[in-house]
Image: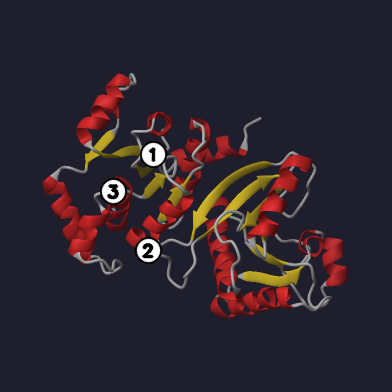
Amino acid sequence: MASIIDKFIEQAKQNPKRVAFPECDNEIMMAAAYKVQKSGIGTAVMVGDGAKLTELCKERGYDPSEVEIVDVNNAEYTDDLVKRYVEDPHTMLKEKGVRRRIADPMYYAMAMEAVGDVDITFAGINCPTGDVIQAGITMVGLADGIATPSSIGLFEIPGYEGSEGNLLVFGDSAVCVNPDAEQLADIAISACTTVSELLKWDPRCALLSFSTTGSAQHELLDKVIEAKKIANEKRPDLKIDGEFQLDAAINPKVGKKKVKHESEVAGQANIIIWPDLNAGNIGVKLVQFFAGANAYGPILQGFRKVVCDCSRSAPVDEIVGNVAMSVIRAGAND
């Protein structure tokens, strides 16, 4: 039986994208780049010192001609890249600032993405998530109306039968430690966008807490209540509701009993948003250890274009699966 990642890979093959890999000095990332190329889900574009990357390919038994190698030392291309980047209405940096930052291949790759030379930048095996996020904010920029980058995870939970079978999306379990109401609203809005792009679901997003629509009063609940209000005002077209306890969010009987107002989310949420990273980290590990859930992600979101991160211990197949998900997202608005 095909796994969900196998399905993502087959779907990505229908509309492959150009994927920049700025960390192919790392052997795992290079192997992943070649597997992406050979799988047909995308064109692997290695970004870095061209001579060094070519030599590393040969040393590791790869044919350099099978992938694209963008040499950051190519003055002609770099000059053209900087010119187009500075002229792009979505970018804010001046020439001097661009040149200083693209000395780092990750920033170079994201400059390429910003101007459309690649569709996706995939990094993180050599650096912390925070560095990838900062590069994404600086070079690619955030999506319209979003001020907070965040993440979601897709979970395949044995024995769970929700509105999307055994699948449920969690956010944010990796990036925002203690989001305020504005940030929590951004996380919910971005999660709806990501789910629409990747899974083609009708997003129904529940903001979680230890209270369901006023069943308790505490200052910890205030930001969740305010986040719902902000999200509804910013995006009235989206189904975002709360504050809900987990059971009221995903169990139709409990949702009907506890939630007295008309809600398209209560009892049938396919996205749940944690109030903070304490709850998110604990929640993720509970479903993994006790339910044996398979977790896919974290999937970064909130950027103007698709920016991807991976664990520094990620194996090749995990990276390829994440790239497949990113390719689907990048092609969602074609």
Q: Does residue 17 appear left or right of residue 322 in this picture?
A: left
Q: Which residue is mark 1?
A: 42
Number of numbered tags placed on the structure image: 3
Crowd tier of the residue under label 1, counting other residues whose Cα lies within 10 Å: few below 14, some 14–19, many 20 or above: many
As drawn, the label of residue 141 is 2
Residue 147, image x, y percentages: 47, 70
Front residue of this view, candidates 305 and 24? 24
The tag earlier along the polypeptide, 3 or 1, is: 1
When asked about the image quadrant of residue 48, the answer is: top left
Q: Where is 65 relative to 108, above or below? A: above
Residue 61, image x, y percentages: 33, 18
Q: Secondary structure at mark 2?
A: loop
Residue 31, image x, y percentages: 41, 28
Residue shown at 17%/42% (left/top)? 73
Kindly check if marks 2 and 1 are in contact, taking CB atoms under 8 A apart as contact. Answer: no
Q: Which residue is mark 3?
A: 104
As drawn, the label of residue 51 is none
Front residue of this view, candidates 189 and 95? 95
Q: Secondary structure at mark 1?
A: strand
Q: CA distance from mark 3 to mark 2?
A: 17 Å
Front label number (3 vs 1): 3
Q: Amino acid at mark 1?
A: Gly
Front label number (2 vs 1): 2
Q: Amino acid at mark 3?
A: Asp
Please state, as top left, top right, bottom left or bottom right, where the C terminus lies in the image. bottom left
Front residue of this view, candidates 127 and 64? 127
User: Can you name the residue that lies furthest to the left here?
Assistant: 76
Let me know if residue 115 appears in the view: yes
Q: Amino acid at mark 2?
A: Gly
